[in-house]
Image (cartoon, helix red, strand yellow):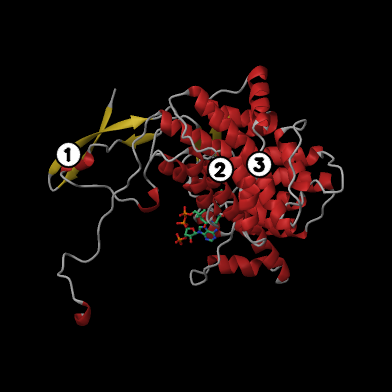
Amino acid sequence: MSKNATLEIDGKKYEFPVIEGTENEVAINIKTLRAATDGVITIDPGYKNTGSCESAITFLDGEKGVLRYRGYSIEELAEKADFLEVAYLLIFGELPTTEQLAKFDSDIKNQSHVDEDVKKILDGFPKSAHPMGVLASLTSALIAFNPTSVNVDSEEEMYNAIVRIMAKFPVLCAWAYRKNAGLPLDYGDDNLGYVDNFLKMMFKKPSGEYNSNKVMVNALDKLLILHADHEQNCSTSTVRIVGSSHAGLFASLSAGMSALWGPLHGGANQAVIEMLEAIKADGGDTKKYMAKAKDKNDPFRLMGFGHRVYKNFDPRAKIIKVAADEVLNDLGVEDPILEIAKGLEKEALSDPYFVDRKLYPNVDFYSGIIYRAMGIPVEMFTAMFALGRLPGWVAQWKEMRLRKEPIGRPRQIYIGENHRPFKSIDNR
Ligand code: ACO
């Protein structure tokens, strides 16, 4: 039976349909609100109560700590699938068959070259440029090398555009790092898997061989899977809203990267390590920093703690915490900041300030420790997040275009000056 919600304004009642998702999430559909009420809108800064779309890609329940891609639990995917399979699942809706996966893999390999002229753009950046700025710019620059816009009604064109970005983005990521590290660019090796090849492009020394390291490949594969999608977060919403103007896929992705860069979003993984380093340099006194995080007059926040939707625990953080221990063990790395991280987590989990506000470690609290153990520098952490999130952004962009969603254009409540006469410059 269909349900309605009733809204009363100045004694007048309006009915709006209530819609329900496949996991019983409930929303009031206010599509007709403004027209029916003669101009009334809703206001919800930060969109804490606003659903921007219906989506069949990712389900998460922040209260129960559940995360599923296309119905499959993140725990099972992280354990049993590889990143390319998960990317296919997110983008095309089903886990690939052996043939589909082989074709996806070989189509990506066939597109893994980046126009040599892209190097000239890369060379224009100072060595000190942050890789996220370089990546957002180079992704946008790819438009110039692929100028025809994708006809989203053509399955073939859509597929080709997806394969192109899945192939070229890891190259851009690795090149952003090598430029920063003063290393000559590397072209990868088609005989290697997607993640292994990325690690080769990052770490192969100009004068040496590249030797695959299974522990590193598995750890990075898992991290990328855990970051692959997270429904309507800040960067994904950015990708969808930019794409809703029918700007192309690469332009939409570039905008998403800029959104991800911020320290309240994907930039948190870098901020966590910087915070842990600062605590270590300051004598390792975790209690002092716990006090700072709770002090409302101090802008310091415990980076890697809290999440807009997870108010119980972040299921990705649980998997990563275990992986961090394993990877450091397997690689024989001893990192004192892992102990500081564990200490902070222990204190926070029993501190009423954090417990009352339901602040738990998020995905980024431990991911940086793994990246560090792998030899990935801290400035590259958010770029690693972007590499993982790429299939999620692509899937969300594709869904938005195929559902023919209208252009995203929120309204506002104006709180500025009322109409006033122009003041000539001598009277101001
Ligand atoms: N340290 C200390 N206090 C915190 C923290 C924190 N990390 N996070 C939230 N709080 C406090 C706030 O001060 C606020 O307290 P109040 O109710 O007394 O005013 C309360 O908890 C609620 O916080 P909000 O900022 O309103 O929560 P919101 O949902 O808007 O923010 C966010 C979520 C941005 C993730 C926040 O928790 C934060 O800044 N965390 C640190 C940055 C971080 O780790 N970001 C990564 C997010 S995960 C990702 O993007 C992959």
Residue at image location 76% in from the left, 53% down from the top: 183
Of badges 1 and 2, the one in the foreground is 2
Q: Position of residue 421 (x, y in %)?
A: 14, 70
The crowd level at tag 2 (other Cα within 10 Å; few <14, some 14-19, many 20+) is some
Q: Nearer the viewer, mark 3 or mark 1?
A: 3
The Cα–Cα distance between marks 3 and 1, rounded to whole angstroms, is 49 Å
Q: What residue is rendered at 50% in x and 55% in y? A: 356
Checking the image for residue 36, the label placed there is 1
Badge 3: how crowded within 10 Å, few (<14), some, or many (20+)?
A: many
Q: Quadrant of the C terminus?
A: bottom left
Q: Secondary structure at mark 2?
A: helix
Circle 2 sits on which residue? Answer: 142
Residue 35 drawn at (x, y percent): 18, 40
Q: Secondary structure at mark 3?
A: helix
Q: Position of residue 267 (x, y in %)?
A: 58, 55
Specify the amino acid type for callout 3: Pro
Q: Hey, which quadrant is residue 201 in on the image?
A: top right
